[in-house]
Image (cartoon, helix red, strand yellow):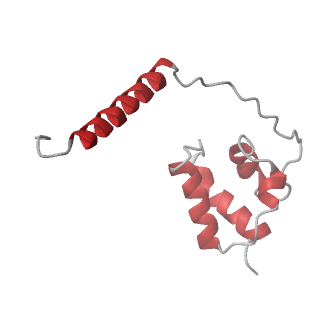
Amino acid sequence: MFRHLPPAVIVILGTLLGALSMLSVARAASPVELKPVKVDLPESDRMFQGSGAAAINNNCLACHSAGMVLNQPALSRQAWTAEVNKMITAYKAPVAPEDVGAIVDYLDRIKGEK
């Protein structure tokens, strides 16, 4: 197959292939080491207040602080509905199905587009 190549090219290719095989052996010999990471999340006992706050306090504060939610931009009701559904479907948030409407109502009332 390589008979038509000049001998110098064959030597260069052989050297390159040998070097590449040495690199792959070296990589296999040193496996990737995963190290634990500690993340300190801010603590807060702040809760949502007002009518309808129970649903968002009971479902959303497990993952989000009230401050994080309250610092979001004002969104349309449709956008808040999409956000709540994304938390449930994409992130597997354990939101009670009967609370979804109340959560959207609350978010629309306090952070909805006016």
Q: Tell me, yes or no, if residue 51 can be seen here.
A: no
User: Where on the picture, by quarter, is residue 93?
Assistant: top right
Q: Tell me, yes or no, if residue 6 can be seen here.
A: yes
Horizontal and vertical percent position of residue 76: 66, 75
State whether residue 26 is above or below residue 76: above
User: Where on the picture, by quarter, is residue 71?
Assistant: bottom right
Horizontal and vertical percent position of residue 74: 75, 72
Could you tell me which residue is drawn at 81 percent across and 51 percent down? Answer: 66
Q: Which corner quadrant holds the N terminus?
A: top left
State whether residue 41 is above or below residue 80: above
Could you tell me which residue is drawn at 76 percent across and 29 percent down? Answer: 38
Horizontal and vertical percent position of residue 6: 20, 44
Could you tell me which residue is drawn at 64 percent across and 72 percent down? Answer: 77
Q: Which corner quadrant holds the C terminus?
A: bottom right
State whether residue 36 is above or below residue 103: above
**Horizontal arrangement in the rendering, residue 42 relative to residue 63 (left or right):** right
**Horizontal arrangement in the rendering, residue 46 relative to residue 15 (left or right):** right
User: Where on the picture, by quarter, is residue 109?
Assistant: bottom right
Q: Residue furthest bottom?
A: 114
Horizontal and vertical percent position of residue 7: 22, 39
In the image, 56 versus 14, the foreground residue is 14
State whether residue 34 is above or below residue 108: above
Could you tell me which residue is drawn at 86 percent across and 55 percent down? Answer: 49
Q: Residue furthest top?
A: 29
